[in-house]
Amino acid sequence: AAGEAEAADAAHGSALGAEALAVCVAAEAEMAGRDAAAAARSAAVNELEGYILEARGMRSRKHGSLIDGASLEPMLDEAEDWLYSDAGEAAGCGELGAFLAALRVRVDGTMVAFREKVEAERVASEAALQASADAAAAERAANGEDEDHDQRRLKYPDRLRMVQKNKDEGTELFKGAVDVTQYRQAAARYNKALTHAAKFVDLSPDQREEVDALKLSLHLNIAMCWLKITDATNHLDQAIRSCTDALALDGENVKALYRRATALEQKKDYEAAKADLAAAAQIAPDDKAVPKLQQRVEAQIKRQLDKEKKMYLEVRQDVRMRPRQPP
């Protein structure tokens, strides 16, 4: 009889263990689903926030005075207010996407003259660059040279001139860019300048310092291009790599720390972004851009923690409210 009782207790305990396991598995699946939904919504929010930030910066660009700022700024303020309102907080991915699409149409309406001017300038600039490239290609062909396999031991001023020429062309493309195509072209020019910068020989200490300063500037410019090339799936990783290359040359460069933090924030690696911004703030306490990004990152960290806590409490409450199955 005692043996039968022990067996019954064991069977009962096994049933309770299976029940608890099933509840835990169900709760874990539910949390995973909520995590996926929260991640998708967070991405939609980030896209909208990023667009508002980018639109605000358009007036500081070349020909930005052609933008109808009197219409644009209240429009962006209204969009930002909605995003952080109760309605915005309750909006799902579909509603956020529709809001962004409508906002793009309205913002584009304030930038017609600006885009026409920039496009005309881009066409003229590309024509000039193509003519320059054609002339350079003809010169290389006449000399029997191939720039991509250029292993000549050029004199320092000659090689420096090639670095600076490509850097200047990249900057011209960047300033006139209106879409990712021009930012890619600018990045290509900057990378070509870096290729030439790697071919200096027999540098004096002063020359080395000048070349390193150029390399630093090029890495920073490439990082900025990649932050703009948003249609590439790896654009944030590329921006982070360029900033890291810049920091290898100057470990206290505030621009590199700030731009890397910007990319890290967009990757939702908030703790790493926070660390870079803390270093930047210590190096340049008077920098005005760093505290603004710090506040945004801290808000994201708090929002993430609040969401995780809310989800945990909801799942815990749900598990407690489920009726226990009889053994």
Image: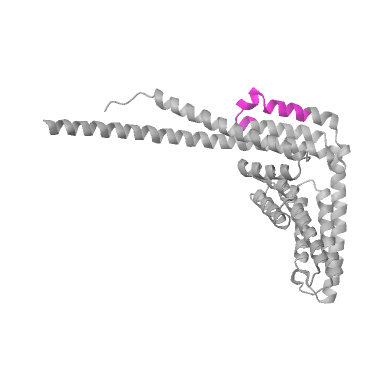
Q: Quadrant of the N terminus?
A: top left
User: x, y (%) of residue 318?
Assistant: 43, 26
Drawn side of residue 312 relative to residue 261, left or right: left
Residue at the limit of the structure toward the left, as seen here: 1
Q: Is residue 216 above or below residue 236?
A: below
Residue drawn at the location 80% of the way across and 50% of the way down: 174
Q: Which residues are magenta?
A: 75-95
Residue drawn at the location 79% of the way across and 27% of the way down: 74
The image's colouring method is one colour
Res. 48 in view: no
Q: Is residue 181 above or below residue 4?
A: below
User: x, y (%) of residue 21?
Assistant: 35, 35
Q: Is residue 54 above or below residue 310?
A: below
Q: Is residue 33 above or below residue 170?
A: above
Q: Is residue 191 magenta?
A: no
Residue at the limit of the structure toward the bottom, as seen here: 144
